[in-house]
């Protein structure tokens, strides 16, 4: 089981120092996200200023880009990082694709993401092996690759593709065609065990693959103090109010609470939302320990047999909580 970190939103000028500190700290991978900044630009700097640690997007919004955009960017980052780059993609939700990126939402998000992955790999195959480009699907038709636009082969063409999701459709897709699956932080071990992993395994079986072919990367809520407890409570209230994530609550018999949270969110009643997230829910959706020294062992025990990679929801910022991070990283390796 690998222990990773997530890069906080920041200006590009600050990325090299964080990347270097993350590698010194001993993280296995540093993930970027697409919230306030582009997720790929920091990866170029992380690759330049590190040597051992992997790097990747968790996630880049797939439907805000074309297969060609993604294929070219990943190709360059894979070569620059000497094979350490992981391309992590997510669909986002309809409102953001339409109203934040100004693009169309597909009739079949899973189907479009499947085609996007196939199209990206077709481009990579053309560049690496000289295969004639002839990818034809419902959403994408790629048939033109003249020498002027062909970057040619690289030393590290086996670029892993992870996708993110909450529900079974994308988990099955990951099992069929991907190298990994990013599980949403709003989950429980039971949800992973009873919903996500069986879906991944269905995809694996359909494609004739092995379970070891698909890594499960899990971002987790961790509570080691009273302050963190209230922060996590607020985050769970936010995520549980989202209709797309309702199945997580329903599995534990809290579907009615999810509906109330959604209603409060529509009315902007944030205080009422937080009060609906009980301590019992925190026990289910977060890892709680008395102090950071106990966190590594608790995470290993909680996710044994489930996760291949663990990332804390809290971003890594050097100079803040360095002793906390050091104790968790060292404890994780020791366990």
Image: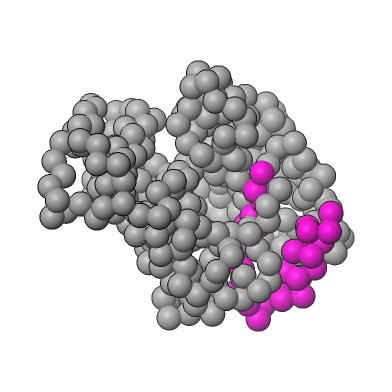
> Which residue appears at 52% of the width and 29% of the height?
175
Judging from the image, the colouring scheme is one colour
Q: Is residue 303 above or below residue 60?
A: above
Q: Can the viewer see residue 300 in this picture?
A: yes
Residue at 75% over, 42% down: 303
Tally of numbered discs? 0
Q: Position of residue 101 (x, y in %)?
A: 28, 52
Front residue of 297 and 258:
297
Q: Is residue 316 magenta?
A: yes
Residue 256 position, x and y percent, is 62, 31
Question: Which of the pair 181/24 is nearer the observer?
Answer: 24
Q: Quadrant of residue 21?
A: bottom right
Q: Toward the viewer: 251 or 74?
A: 74
In this rendering, would 107 be left or right of 34? left
Q: Is residue 283 above or below residue 169?
A: below
Q: Within the image, what quadrant is residue 63 found in?
A: top left
Q: Quadrant of residue 36?
A: bottom left
Residue at the outermost top position = 206
Query: Which one is in front, 241 or 135?
Result: 135
Residue 256 visible to an observer of this rendering: no
> What residue sits 57% from the left and 34% below the top?
213
Look at the picture and state if 135 lies above or below 273: above
Residue at image location 77% in from the left, 75% down from the top: 323
Instruction: Determine if the magenta segment contains residue 231.
Output: no
Residue 112 lies, with reference to residue 27, above or below; the image says above
- Which image quarter is the C terminus in? bottom right
Q: In this picture, which residue range is highlighted in magenta? A: 308-335
């Amino acid at each position: 089981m690998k222990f990773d970190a997530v890069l906080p939103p920041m200006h590009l000028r600050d990325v090299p120092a964080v990347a270097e500190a993350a590698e010194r700290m001993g993280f296995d991978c540093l993930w970027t996200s697409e919230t306030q900044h582009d997720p790929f630009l920091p990866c170029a700097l992380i690759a330049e200023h590190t040597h051992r640690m992997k790097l990747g997007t968790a996630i880049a919004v797939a439907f805000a880009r074309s297969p060609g955009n993604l294929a070219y960017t990943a190709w360059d980052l894979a070569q620059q990082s000497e094979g350490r780059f992981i391309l992590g993609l997510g669909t986002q939700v309809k409102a953001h694709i339409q109203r934040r990126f100004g693009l169309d939402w597909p009739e079949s998000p899973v189907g479009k993401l499947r085609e996007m992955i196939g199209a990206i790999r077709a481009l990579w195959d053309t560049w690496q092996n000289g295969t004639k480009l002839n990818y034809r699907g419902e959403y994408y038709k790629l048939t033109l690759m003249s020498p002027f636009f062909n970057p040619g082969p690289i030393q590290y063409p086996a670029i892993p593709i992870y996708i993110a999701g909450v529900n079974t459709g994308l988990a099955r897709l990951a099992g069929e065609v991907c190298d990994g699956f990013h599980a949403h932080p709003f989950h429980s071990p039971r949800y992973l065990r009873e919903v996500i992993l069986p879906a991944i395994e269905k995809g694996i079986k359909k494609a004739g693959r092995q379970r070891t072919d698909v890594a499960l990367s899990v971002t987790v809520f961790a509570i080691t103090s009273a302050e963190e407890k209230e922060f996590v409570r607020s985050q769970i209230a936010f995520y549980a109010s989202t209709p797309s994530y309702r199945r997580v609550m329903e599995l534990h018999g809290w579907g009615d609470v999810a509906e109330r949270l959604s209603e409060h969110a529509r009315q902007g009643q944030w205080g009422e939302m937080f009060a609906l997230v009980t301590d019992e829910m925190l026990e289910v959706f977060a890892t709680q320990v008395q102090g950071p020294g106990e966190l590594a062992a608790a995470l290993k025990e909680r996710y044994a047999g489930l996760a291949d990679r663990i990332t804390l929801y809290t971003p890594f910022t050097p100079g803040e909580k360095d002793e906390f991070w050091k104790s968790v990283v060292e404890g994780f390796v020791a366990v």
